[in-house]
Image (cartoon, coloured by chain):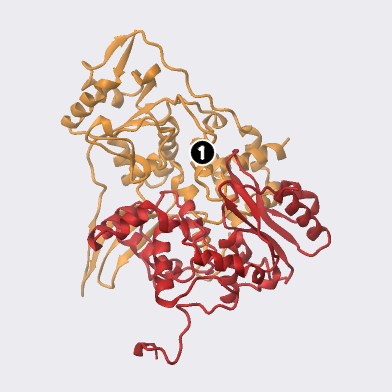
Chain colours: A orange, B red
Amino acid sequence: MTKILFSDKLDNCVERWKSAGLTVIGPVQRANISTYAAVEHASEFDFGLVLPDRSIKDLFFPQSEPMLRYTIKKESIDTDECLPPSGPRIIFGARPCDASGMAIDDPLFGWDYKDEYWFQRRNESVIVTIACTKADDFCMCTSLNMAPDSTKGSDILLRPLAGNKGWLVEELTNRGREAFKTIADILQESSDLPAPLAVVEKKFDLDACVAWLQNPENFESRFWKEISMRCIGCASCTYLCPTCHCFDIQDEGDTYTGIRRKNWDSCSFALFTMHTSGHNPRSTQSARWRQRIMHKFNYFPGKFSVNSCSGCGRCSRQCPVDMGITETLQEISTLSL
Amino acid sequence: MSIEEQYRTRAKELLSGGAVKMVIGYGKGSNASRRRPIFISSADDVERLVLDDACITNLSGYLVSEGLLSDEKRVAVFLRPEGIRAINILAAESQLDADQIVIFGFDVAGNEVKALKGIHVEEFSDVITSIKESAPEAAEEELFEKIEKMSPQERFSFWQEEFSKCIKCYACRQACPMCYCRRCIVDSNQPQWVNTSSHTLGNFEWNIVRAFHLSGRCVECGNCDRACPVNIPLRLINHRMAEEVLGAFDHFAGTSKTQEPVLASFKKDDSETFIL
């Protein structure tokens, strides 16, 4: 016997969590874009999406974050630190690739300086993940040694029942158990079986790719130029990526008063590594694309023992010129044979 | 022979005879409905070229990639009428020498692909004139009509909501053949003319600056609109500006390679005193 949360009871749960002071967030379709956003009622959720266009990263690492306000006076400088808006929240209906993406970035945001913006939000969020029963051409979690029901980064895993009736509940962490205590009486015992998981075909041999990337001889391979010739150098892939985490710090204001912000930045941009002198160590798009792949599958795992990719496929799905990590690693797989 | 085969044959002839150094066209994409830009430099690879109704991306922007045309060799490129207009503008704005461009012209009606006759940009002037006379598709769109009927406040709210979705990935700029500046104004930080933040104000600044910069230059190929990962209907704002320029100056962008840029030129006898 397992605990079941029936779909028609979800609105009661939303009410319960709201009255317990939690902001309830989940996948929604709004203004022609799907994203994770706060809801008032369960009816606003869209569980039919393979995954939202925008990744869950937005909730932990927003595109533009105020860090401090400053006023420069004659003899002093006043500063006023901006901390992230706090408050507990429950993210209901994350996808396993999105939830694991946040766990992948935890060591990055904590290794030298503990990023309080990231960790405050991480510590105040319960992630309730729904296992995937459908996938599209771009899903590639299995190629990254993950699965449509991976639990990494999740506090609760829900397995959908056939016919959208509800979900089997698997409590994974204490934080998840706490949040589900508030709805303990709404859950029901049942012997219903979960619907079959999505079939996500394995698209490349990750170990072979990593070995090829780690071979210093391949750093200057012609492959990089060929694969990225059509790259237009936008940041669609990096900004939709749940694990891409680069940012820039900018002061906005005039000579006397302003605000310091932490804004997303992207290795796809020529400006990303431009020196004050005008020299750019990554002067071509191929060098920039190589950096992105090397960072995710060579440098990041070298430091944190985990690949900086959770297999969501957004990079390929949304690329204006049909590029992406999948194609690049598929090509590398064949090169390394 | 299908148009695809005809163009493959032509590409093979041009490459093997050395008449062009490269053919920029479309190849198979990562699934059945996708096509991707490909660059063919060897006559042996022409079989990779695909031409069907899914070939939508305007490829003209690749021609102004740094260094591509600097050896004065010719490059062939698959272009729809909008792409051909873009070549005219790029030539008029001294970004390329139109004689270096060999055009594989095509158009799509319904799901049928038809070849456009001609090789050099000046041979397509009839096609361009006929587009000027028929209303572009965006004008027939329901959403466009709806926005036109809005009050200024409603229209402002509409664009505020749309621009608030912007993440400043600059896919619109990078996908646009007219955004060829080696350093865009938003990337200039001494001084920082435009906020880099993607808050609502910063997003307004970016999108409005771009809309103005494209006025009288946009060919409405739709590259920006399709590239936008957050689905902002950029085609509508560009179409509105194109209509404005057409009405005020009778200027239809990209009719010839010697067409004077409408907002980057002036006449001494202009009726507006602030001009001189």
Name the side, left or right, on which A295 lies relative to B157. right
Q: List x then y, in percent, for residue A86.
A: 23, 42
Question: In which quadrant will I find the C terminus of chain B?
Answer: bottom left
Q: Which residue of the protein is positioned furthest toward the right in this rendering? A: B17
Name the side, left or right, on which B55 lies relative to B228. right
Label total for image? 1
Q: Please give the name of the residue rendered at 55% of the width and 70% of the height, measured from the top-left corner.
A: B254
Disc 1: which residue: A313
Q: Can residue B276 be seen in this view?
A: yes
Q: In this view, does A138 lie above or below B148?
A: above
Question: In the depicted view, which residue is nearer to us: B145 or A193?
Answer: B145
Q: Please give the name of the residue rendered at 48% of the width and 50% of the height, measured from the top-left corner.
A: A236
Q: Is residue A185 above or below residue A23?
A: above
Give the amino acid at mark 1.
Gly
Q: List x then y, in percent, for residue B255.
A: 56, 72
SS label for mark 1: loop
Q: Is residue A284 visible?
A: no
Within 10 Å of the Cα at label 1, are there few (<14), some (14-19), or many (20+) other Cα atoms? Answer: many
Q: List x then y, in percent, for residue A51.
A: 42, 35
Name the side, left or right, on which B34 lies relative to A334. left
Q: Please give the name of the residue rendered at 41% of the width and 67% of the height, measured from the top-left corner.
A: B243
Question: In the depicted view, which residue is nearer to us: B96 or B184?
Answer: B96
Q: Please give the name of the residue rendered at 74% of the width and 49% of the height, measured from the top-left corner.
A: B5
Q: List x then y, in percent, for residue A163.
A: 38, 18
Tell me the chain of label 1: A
Question: In the depicted view, which residue is nearer to us: A157 or A255?
Answer: A157
